[in-house]
Image (cartoon, rainbow, N blue to C red):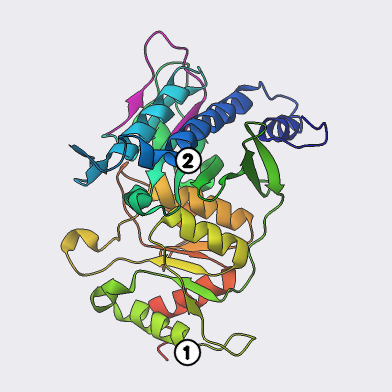
Amino acid sequence: MDRFVMTLNRHIIEQERLYPHATGAFTALLTDIALAAKIISYHVNKAGLVDILGKSGTTNVFGEEQEKLDVFAHEIMVRSLVHGGKLCALASEESDGLIPIPENIPKGKYVCLFDPLDGSSNIDVNVSIGTIFSIYRRVTSGDGPGTLEDLLQPGYKQVCAGYVIYGSSTMLVYTTGTGVHGFTLDPSYGEFVLSHPNIKIPTKGKIYSVNESYFDYWDEGVKNYVRWAKRAVPSDGRPMNSRYIGSLVADFHRNLLKGGIFLYPGDNKSPDRKQGKLRLLYEANPMAFIVEQAGGKASDGFRRILDIQPTELNQRTPLIIGSKEDVEIAEEFIQGKRSE
């Protein structure tokens, strides 16, 4: 390998050197996540050739029918993380409750929450999907098993968040609170190589991403914002463009690099959708940490996402995330401060 190539492992190690008391545990944890991502990427890329497409015949904790690939990715993440001795507990969007560390495994000082395969219903049509992860330090004392208290922390306490997008190439994007960096999996090396250092989201974008099929069920503030976006005149004299993939990782990744806003508001189609569909701990918090580190903003329309105190693992939240000016304009409409 070229000695000037900056791999993910090398980058993590160099970052850890900035902290004299670092033990290497955090480096090992991110290395385990990267390994899981490589395995998932390999199987995603051959999904049409093997029997891992379609429904699994089981449902997750939210009552949603699981895809075979969801279950596979969940198992890979758990197997990669649970035996490393760096975690005291973990939780997955595809699992009900806390996932304990086996008794014979040392308990570490971190917890990890993850969505093993976001947007997996799109795999059959070859649309980009992804893995989202979030890491916190444990808050309970001692070296015993972790508890729900360790997992139910507000997003501003994250020590690391990231996602992997499986598309035309596989890319891992992460932050530890000192900027956002992107690494592309190079098949010739079998390594994630730094391709997007110090990512910064444009302050104002030209793209809005939202599922407009729910328009009739939104609160008036959300409707007013989308109406405004359709006729707003950015610097080039054109309204904002609508681009909605239906895969959070894919929509977010595009907007992170090009600028724009992603919205998944609550709606009135049914009582359980008032808080939207996205999960605070598994999706909103890690993406919010990333976007803020890149200079953007994340809100539920009224509050900063990272300030919300979770009360349950399965908690849902509306999410408005992206370029800072775009999110602030959307908040003004949602809060009733603008109506034009």
Task: Report the Cα–Cα distance between label 1 and label 2.
Answer: 36 Å
Sequence order check: which comes first, mark 1 or mark 2? 2
Q: Is residue 222 visible?
A: yes
Secondary element under disc 2, as helix, strand or loop, is: strand
Residue 231 x/y as whole percent: 47, 89
Residue 318 found in image quarter: bottom left
Secondary structure mainly formed by the magenta segment: loop
Q: Which residue is mark 2?
A: 133
Q: Does residue 100 belong to the magenta stretch?
A: yes
The outermost residue toward the right is 4
The image shows residue 16, relative to residue 159, as above or below, that is above
The residue positioned 49% from the left and 46% from the top of the image is 166
Q: Which residues are magenta?
A: 97-112
Residue 231's disc is 1
The image shows residue 332, relative to residue 73, as above or below, that is below
Q: Is residue 138 visible?
A: no
Secondary element under disc 1, as helix, strand or loop, is: helix
Mark 2 surroundings within 10 Å by alpha-carbon count, few (fewer than 14), some (14 through 19), many (20 or more): many
**Which quarter of the rendered picture does the N terminus lie within?**
top right
